[in-house]
Each structure stands twice: as structure tokens, then as C-alpha cells.
Image (tube, grey):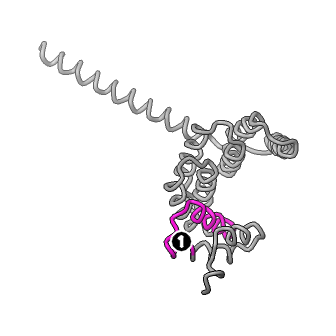
Amino acid sequence: MAESESPTLAKAAALLQEGHADEAAEVFSALISSGVQSPDAYRGRGIAYMRLERWKDAVSDLTAARRLDPDDPEIWVNLAVSLARDNEIYPALAAFESVLIAHPNHLRAHVELAMVHFRLGAFPKGQQELRLALGCRPTLEQRRAIEQMLAEQKQLDHKRHFRPDFEALHRAEQARASDSWLAAAGRAVAGWFKKGKG
């Protein structure tokens, strides 16, 4: 390849923006193979893989991009989305939580997290995230889209059965197990004292 034809980040980014995810991934790969250690190269290839629905590859590249640029919230959001699409739900929720702790007004993070909650059947949590997104200064177009999603969810609420809050059920089960263990321990100790007196 001639020097003037060497792949560049700008060329790869342009291909990605034009919707040529396959070609963009190849150019980003060539850059990475040539030794470029840029978060932009890994992020770009990760986004290309997202568009190609190659979720594991996207997770790998976005993880590398995050290591190189841990302060970029878009990398975190794309990583969380890729994890969720790869059915790595708990790591995805942890990534969303991390980005929202550091950037509580990150509009896209709230919207994408809402979509994950809706896919999981955690509708109230999804609706809560959309309401939080409305507080993140969306554009007029974004506000309308979010309000439309909330309106659709409200209509669906009348037709659906709600998924149990498994986290609350798990906490309640742990509390019951802890209480029953304490009660059993108390009975055992009381029994020892009775035996000691007799």
C-alpha cells in the first residue's frame, strides 16, 4: 500500500458515518494491526461491530477503548449497550450505573438504560429512566421522542402483567433466611441453657 493510501482514522470514521460498517471495521482493524493504540480506533471499530451486530467483538473493542480513555461517557454507554445485546445483563447494568454516577445528566445513558429495562420487563424502572432523561435538557425532537415512548408505555401498562421485582423478592428471601437462621440459633442456645440447668 502506498504511503498516501495508508488507512487513516478520518477515512475509517467517514466510512462509518456513511453507513459502510464492514469497510470501516476493516480500516480500523488495519490501523490497530499497524500498532495504533488510539481509543478512537478501538471505539470506531467497536461501533462498526455494533452496527454489524457482532456484540462480543464490540464489547472487546469498547473495553479496550475504555481502558485507553476511561473518561469518555460515550464509550461506556456503547459498551453497556453491547453487553446488554450480548445478554450480559449484570455487566451492562453495572456499566450504565458507572456512567450515570460520573455523568448523571447523560441523556443517552438514561434512554438506553430505559430500553434495557423494557426488554427485561422492568417497566417502572424503564419509565423512571425516561423521566430522568427528560431532566437532561433534551432537544425538542429528543423530548418529543421520549414523551412518545412514555405515552406508549403508559398505554401498554393497561394491557400487560407486570414482571415481579426479582431484586425485592431476593432481598425478602435473604431476610427470611437470615431471620429463620437467627431464630434457629436462638432456639439452640436456649436449649443449651435448659440442658445446663437440668
From which residue to which does the magenta span run?
31-53
Which quadrant of the view contains residue 142? top right
Residue placed farthest to the bottom in the image? 1
Q: Name the residue at 72% across, 35% down.
A: 132
Q: Is residue 77 above or below residue 150?
A: below
- Dot 1: what SS? helix
The amino acid type of the residue labelled 1 equals Ile
The x, y position of residue 154, in whole percent, is 82, 40
The x, y position of residue 20, in whole percent, is 73, 74
Residue placed farthest to the top in the image? 197
The residue labelled by disc 1 is: 32
Which of 2/87 is in front?
Answer: 2
- On screen, residue 189 versus residue 69, left or right, reads left
The x, y position of residue 74, in whole percent, is 64, 51
Quadrant of the image for the C terminus?
A: top left
Which quadrant of the view contains residue 22? bottom right
Q: Name the residue at 63% across, 64% down.
A: 44
Q: Is residue 195 above or below residue 49?
A: above
